[in-house]
């Protein structure tokens, strides 16, 4: 496999996780990085010694030694940075959300396809041990026909206030809890049920807890609830919240107060719960609890995701988190906001 020369743009936590993944895999080299923040750039320079460190990401994109970029910028820069990267002939792995809306993502899909470049959006949880074990069981048909899935990502006191306040400003984030953490929960169940085409959404988003936001603009939702119908007749229920008054059975985490994160998939022969990973199988009327083996000692989700991206660049694999799925994911997000605003179910064309 050809060693791909990679640039990372945006050096916060996800940027550093991708750098770690690159180093652990050893199949590509971190050639360049870019960030406006001197301290973050210096930290990555010290730890990973890339050949080039830029503050202006446009300069990195003009560097002919860079084959591929990983974009970990604030949400509103995903579209312009990905487009500029594609126009400069680079393959792209971009952090979630892929863009601020589906219209932007459709442009990126078209531009990447036209140039025969690999586009992936980052969703490392698709590659976690529990997700891979659950997906395997589902693909083996152990659930029968899937008709319903529950997607949950709720924090008790987790309104993000770092990053200069961009997370809570609609213009720069595209939305609040839904586009920040709800997207993880939604994508997890959608991926497990085989990414069927969404056809309609009924949803309501709320802003209930401005007192827990940091200083600065707070014009996004802190909670979102949605009911999504799919072409194959399955339905998904999503609940997500940055600041819910959670009950005491939900354990506290190191950050963000208490946290309730789960995916449950229901089928005619059984169901699967991701956390803790368990299969519940119908055995002649009795529901048997079957533990599933999730191998922990494999590379991390970030590494497996990176491996897929690099293999796709070398023509050895199809991208798992591909541009078609990024468009559909953003269509669901758009429809959730539209449905809430209109107060009714909205179709997805
Ligand atoms: N996959 C995950 O689990 C995960 C986790 C956290 C964040 N994210 C996503 O990653 C992205 C970044 O999130 P974050 O928490 O690191 O945010 P952040 O604000 O902490 O970091 C963004 C970085 O981008 C830099 N930056 C901003 N504008 C720039 C520009 N014009 N040129 C160069 N650098 C610029 C900033 O200096 C900062 O270091 C977001 O889209 C977020 O949704 C994903």
Image: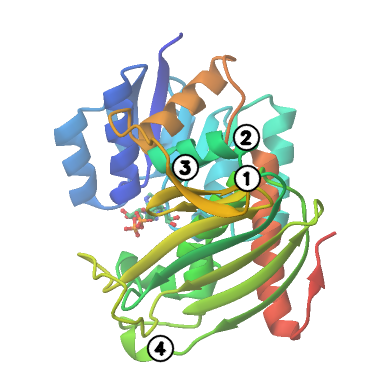
Q: Nearer the viewer, mark 4 or mark 1?
A: 1
What sort of colour scheme is used for the picture? rainbow
- Look at mark 2 in the image and give the residue it sits on: 139
- Look at mark 1 in the image and give the residue it sits on: 143
Q: Using the rendered image of the protein, determine whether residue 175 is visible from the camera's viewpoint.
A: no
Q: Nearer the viewer, residue 227 or 58?
A: 227
Cα separation, mark 3 vs mark 1, equals 15 Å
Q: Position of residue 316 (x, y in %)?
A: 57, 14
Cα separation, mark 2 vs mark 3, equals 12 Å
Q: Position of residue 95 (x, y in %)?
A: 47, 47
Is 173 situated left or right of 53 in this image? right
Answer few, some or many: residues within 10 Å of disc 4's Cα (few below 14, many 20 plus, some between 14 and 19): some
Answer few, some or many: residues within 10 Å of disc 1's Cα (few below 14, many 20 plus, some between 14 and 19): many
- Look at mark 4 in the image and give the residue it sits on: 209
Q: Nearer the viewer, residue 268 or 108?
A: 268
Q: Is mark 1 within 8 Å of ligand 1?
A: no
The quarter of the picture where residue 339 lies is bottom right
Res. 79 mark: none
Among the two numbered marks 3 and 1 on one chain, the one whose residue lies closer to the N terminus: 3
Q: Nearer the viewer, mark 3 or mark 4?
A: 3
Is 229 situated left or right of 184 in this image? right
Q: Nearer the viewer, mark 2 or mark 4?
A: 2
- Look at mark 3 in the image and give the residue it sits on: 131
Q: Helix, strand, or loop for circle 2?
A: helix
């Amino acid at each position: 496999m050809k060693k791909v020369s990679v640039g990372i743009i945006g050096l916060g936590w996800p940027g550093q996780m991708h750098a770690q993944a690159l180093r652990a895999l050893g199949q590509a080299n971190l050639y360049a990085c870019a960030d406006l923040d001197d301290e973050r750039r210096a930290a990555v320079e010290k730890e990973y010694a890339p050949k080039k460190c830029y503050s202006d990401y446009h300069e990195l994109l003009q560097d002919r030694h860079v084959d591929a970029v990983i974009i970990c910028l604030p949400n509103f820069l995903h579209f312009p940075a990905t487009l500029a990267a594609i126009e400069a002939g680079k393959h792209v792995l971009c952090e979630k959300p892929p863009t601020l809306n589906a219209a932007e993502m459709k442009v990126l899909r078209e531009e990447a396809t036209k140039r025969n470049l690999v586009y992936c959006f980052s969703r490392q949880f698709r590659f976690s041990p529990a997700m891979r074990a659950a997906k395997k069981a589902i693909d083996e048909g152990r659930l029968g026909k899937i008709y319903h899935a529950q997607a949950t990502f709720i924090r008790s006191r987790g309104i993000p206030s770092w990053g200069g306040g961009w997370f809570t400003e609609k213009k720069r984030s595209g939305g609040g809890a839904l586009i920040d953490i709800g997207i993880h929960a939604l994508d997890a169940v959608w991926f497990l049920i085989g990414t069927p085409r969404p056809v309609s959404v009924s949803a309501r988003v709320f802003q209930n807890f401005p007192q827990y936001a940091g200083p600065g603009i707070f014009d996004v939702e802190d909670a979102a609830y949605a009911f999504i119908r799919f072409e194959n007749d399955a339905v998904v229920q999503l609940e997500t919240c940055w600041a819910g008054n959670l009950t005491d059975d939900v354990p506290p985490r190191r950050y963000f107060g208490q946290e309730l994160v789960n995916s449950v998939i229901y089928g005619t022969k059984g169901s699967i719960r991701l956390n803790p990973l368990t299969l519940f199988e119908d055995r002649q009327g009795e529901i048997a609890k079957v533990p599933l083996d999730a191998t922990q000692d494999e590379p991390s989700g970030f590494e497996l995701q990176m491996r897929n991206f690099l293999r796709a660049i070398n023509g050895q694999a199809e991208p798992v988190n591909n541009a078609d799925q990024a468009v559909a994911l953003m269509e669901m997000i758009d429809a959730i906001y539209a449905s809430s605003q209109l107060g009714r179910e909205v179709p997805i064309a």
